[in-house]
Amino acid sequence: MTLVKNHIVDLYISCEDEKRAKNWYLNVLGLTDLVMDNGCRLLLIEWGEKHKPIVDGAVFSLQAPDIHKAHSELKRRGAKVDEEVVQFGAKSLGFHVIDSEGNVILIIDQSS
């Protein structure tokens, strides 16, 4: 019997303003829903003024079918992104984006 299953259920994303964060994830990042294709949910947890991003680095990553297009489009939409797409590991390219609440997300290409 397995003690803990190898399955992420939810990602808790701390935010100051849940409505602003939801708008960012859907309209700036371009997600169609806060439920991922594999069923994992992005749960936006509103802390108000007590919100502080958990860490300086990314705590999760999302894949982009065209990493360069994703980078330029997010930049065009006003998102805070790394200056350029860089190498991650031996085979992957990616960049960081900061959500409306100051949380860091890694966007990585599909070869990862």
Image: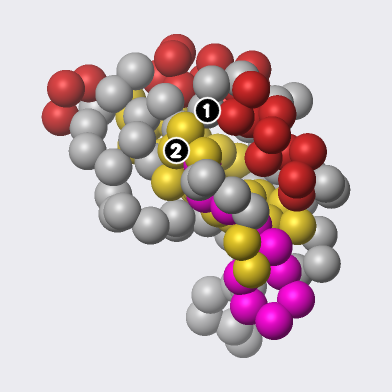
Q: Helix, strand, or loop for circle 1?
A: loop
Is residue 53 shown left or right of residue 34?
A: left
Whichever of labels 2 and 1 marks the residue nearer the N terminus, that label is 1
The quadrant holding residue 52 is top left
**Residue 79: mark:** 1
Q: Estimate the x, y position of residue 87 in percent, counting from the top left.
A: 64, 68
Query: Is residue 57 shown above or below 41?
Result: below
Amino acid type for the residue under numbered disc 1: Ala
Q: Looking at the image, is 12 positioned above or below residue 106?
A: above
| Residue 53 falls within the magenta-colored stretch | no
Q: Is residue 9 visible?
A: no
Three-letter residue code for mark 2: Ile
Q: Specify the segment rendered in magenta.
A: 88-97
Discs 2, 1 touching: Cβ within 8 Å: yes
What's the mark number on residue 31?
A: none
Neighbours of disc 1 within 10 Å: few (<14), some (14-19), many (20+): some
**Image quadrant containing the N terminus:** bottom right
- The residue located at (24%, 27%) in the rendering is 47
Write down the residue under mark 2. 98
Above or below residue 1? Residue 5 is: above
